Image (cartoon, helix red, strand yellow):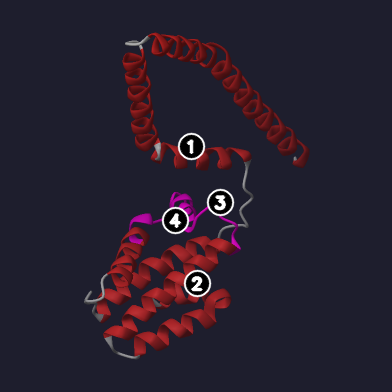
Amino acid sequence: MEDNKINISQKYGKFWDIVEDALNDGSEYGYKVAVMDTEKILRIALKEKNIPGSTYDEKVDFVAKTLNNPDKLKYSRAMHKKITDEIDFDISLDDTKEIIAGYYKAISDISEMNHYSVSTKDKFMLLGEKYSKRLPDIARNTVIALLFFFGLLFISSETEIGREIASMLVSFSLVIFYRLIPTIIAIIAFIFISLIIIAEIKKRKKH
């Protein structure tokens, strides 16, 4: 831990002192406080470097790709979660040192990074990762909507008024499928291509 302290002492020295005081308390409560305070330092480091992401977890996931040992940070954050979620979670001094060492290695790596400039590519990557996690929910909701729609068509076709409503729904769905959806896709594609072109132009101007 001393090596990690030296690496980041100039920028995070006062925060490290708080962690050290909590460790020196010698109690399990002090160990837990030390871990939670180290998590706070990670938050500060990510904010200072302008790491992209709309949430703290997204920022951590993004920066983890650049760390020398992301698994240690993953372990440390998992232990932090146990400390905050489980009131009776037991932790020893050695456990605490291992957890903090993982945090400090990550913080040290982040502190050596240049201030991050979020590119258009990064924004699209984050959006892609965000919505890819929601795909199961989106797919489930889509299936439910389709089942409801076709069920409504089946029930409606049993009466004269229902058949008229069903005919209107079919016509409406055809308009959406053949006209509205292609138009929306074309607009999204145009915006996407335009953003990429603008980003490339800005990049060339900088050089």
Front-most of 7 and 115?
A: 115
- The residue singled out by tag 3 in the image is 52
**N-terminal-most mark, 3 or 4:** 3
Q: Residue furthest right?
A: 205
Write the start and end of the magenta stretch as one range. 48-72
Q: Residues within 10 Å of mark 4 (few under 14, many from 20)?
A: few
Give the Cα separation between the discs numbered 2 and 1.
35 Å
Residue at 41% x, 88% y is: 21
Residue hosting label 2: 7
Specify the amino acid type for callout 4. Answer: Asp
Numbered mark located on residue 54 in the image? none
Residue at x 38%, y 86% (from the top left corner): 22
> Which part of the image, by quadrant, shows the N terminus?
bottom left
Q: Element under label 2?
A: helix
Q: Alpha carbon of mark 3 to alpha carbon of mark 4: how far?
A: 11 Å
Sequence order check, earlier mark of 4 and 2 = 2
Circle nearer the N terminus (2, 3): 2
Q: Secondary structure at mark 1?
A: helix
Residue at image point 31% right, 84% down:
29
User: Hey, which quadrant is residue 149 in on the image?
Assistant: top left
Which amino acid does the dot numbered 1 rest on?
Gly
* Dot 2 crowding, Cα within 10 Å, few <14, some 14–19, many 20+: some
Q: Which mark is residue 128?
A: 1
Q: Which residue is mark 4?
A: 57
Q: Is residue 67 magenta?
A: yes
Q: CA distance from mark 4 to mark 2?
A: 24 Å
Camera-nearest label, 3 or 1: 1
> How many C-alpha atoms fall within 10 Å of the one at disc 1: few (<14), some, or many (≥20)?
few
Dot in front, 2 or 1? 1
Residues at marks 3 and 1, CA–CA distance in whole angstroms: 13 Å
Nearest the viewer among 14 and 9 is 14
